[in-house]
Image (cartoon, rainbow, N blue to C red):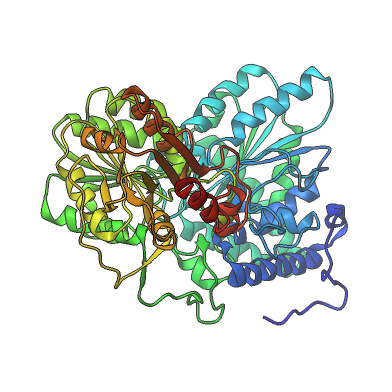
Amino acid sequence: MARKFDDKYDFSKIGPDPSFVKKLDEKGLEVLAAEIRRRIIEATSKQGGHLASNLGTVELTIALYRAFDFPKDKLIFDVGHQSYAHKILTGRSLEGMGRKEGPAPFIAREESPYDLFEAGHAGTAVSALCSFCLDRDLKKEKHEVVALVGDSSIVNGLSFEALNYFPSLHSKGIIVINDNDMSISAPVGGMGDFFRSISTSRAYNRLKRGYKKALSLTKAGDWLYELSYAFKTKVKAMLVPTSLFDNMGYTYIGPVDGHSFRALEKAFKKAKAASKPAVVHVLTQKGRGYLRAEEDRTGYWHGVTPFDVDEGTPKSLHPGYLSWSHYFGDLVEKAMGEDENRLLVCPAMIKGSHLEAAFARYPERSFDVGIAEEHALTMGGTLASLGRKVIVSVYSSFLQRAYDELLHDAARIAAPILLLIDRAGFVGKDGPTHQGIYDPAYLRSIPGVRLSMPSTVEIASFLFEEGLSFKKGPFAIRYPHSLFPLEAKDPRLPEKGEGLFLREGNGKALLIAIGPLGRSFMAEAGEGFDLFDPVYLFPVGEKTLSRLLSYERIAIYDPYGTKEGFASSLTLALEEKGYRGRLFVHAAASAYVPSMSVEDQLSFSGLGKECLPVVLEELLA
């Protein structure tokens, strides 16, 4: 994409002071928006990232910087995947995003004084807004606080809790709802219907934009548009019932064309002048500026791997390989076809967990509950208690938001749900908010949960079939998003509830390694000790424990969880049986792991190539 600038405007260098946007005329703003979109498309096409959500918020972000005085005024992002324009305006390049030396993929406080609140999960901004406003008021300071909420994050339970509470503070804050008629993919639920009822139809809004554009060609047309707009607004105020936000104690402003600088400027001016909390309802087009992303209703262009801009095709094709997420998605589709009593529940990550085929073929039995993990687990647990055969699919880092529901509404009542935990282990550039290394530690505290992790596709299929028929409570299978070679075959399977010895005969030293990375680690470890794949992380089988007690030295290699997870569970179980040998634990760091490649994150935790000689010394001493 060749860079072209109007002679009067050159935005080849932007930042770090974004106040220049306040001085731009309408033409300059359009040129700036085009340049920011070019940079977003170029960067994501090279290295991947969040494309569609960021393309839709370009004018909105510029308008926020024109209307407010950041960072004196405070800007809070709900999910950082709509912050790329914000990063560019504050002088940051998108190159190398998510790598060790590059910018963070989301908001990072240490990176910029304009980054004030870190969030990788949805629904947090309004709650944070309460805190920023309260802190300001207690200090008797005078500045605005703005929360930018997007991609249906407003439907999250935490958002509703904060929306309900904020007016009781008798404080002033501005909530900007970026309504692009999408979540990660298409939105679900009554709140989406509510927003669509406020904004009327998208066709109407396209007609309205066309009407405005046609009239703005002349001064007389401008005057006529302003007159007709004022008349329409007064009529609408008399005829349209007050919105949910009005009834909750907010000044509702909208809907506002999120790609019109004039409309946004007027809306933000009204919000600043309001005497109580304000909600600015902004209509944007997700993916604006890249046709394929504009037309996407599946979420394909929400987060992308490197792609060819002209062809719209991925650059990183891996023939002969399949992701674990894709494999389990195929298993789900097959299982749904085999039993009409089987139901599928997923909180928003249909595309990410490759469940599109199951949702397309069995829409009446597949339920996307939106960004609402808590609801997904209570709904799944209750359905299972009613005799339904339920599969719940959720990312590891999102499952932690539903700990209480899993404990209280599923495990406590022994609801037999099959819980698929995607994105287990290190996740690379998504960084500290998305790491999938913590779930074994908190899941082992919940009575009645059986947690497993396959290292081969044969074991994956074995566990999946067991989980479908398991009746004693939640049966959980965790797996990474990494790739595996399709030709790899290993017919060895464990006994149900017990681990799998891959090599025996030494009797004195044993290497225990978990998951696909554990298999690779064992393959490189050499001879002189036995090899064991635990398969079931907990509870540990009685036969397994009895056999492990005979070993003098045991080394545990767990690249998918912290030492508080499987390693602690096994250590405690062995101690209770009177184990007197030596245990060596190598697990993910009990830390917040920064954005970098998975290989660098393994090294960060001492689990990379440097770990092997250490383990060999422990076992062969």
Name the spot of residue 235 as percent of width and height, x first.
56, 41
**Above or below 603: residue 540:** above
Of 322 and 270, nearer the camera is: 322
**Above or below 424: residue 51:** below
Residue 257 in sight from this viewpoint: no
- Place residue 296 in its image quadrant: bottom left
Name the spot of residue 89 as percent of width and height, x first.
78, 57
Quarter of the picture holding the N terminus: bottom right
Of 150 and 244, nearer the camera is: 150
Tell me the residue at 69%/30% (across/down): 173
Tell me the residue at 50%/81% (across/down): 311
Q: Is residue 33 left or right of residue 377?
A: right
- Place residue 389 in its image quadrant: top left
Tell me the residue at 56%/37% (across/down): 590
Residue 433 in sight from this viewpoint: yes
Of 22 and 503, nearer the camera is: 503
Name the spot of residue 110 as percent of width and height, x first.
76, 43
Of 465 and 434, nearer the camera is: 465
Q: Is residue 545 left or right of residue 108?
A: left
Name the spot of residue 131 as percent of width and height, x first.
68, 25
**Above or below 142: residue 500:** below
Q: Is residue 176 left or right of residue 315?
A: right
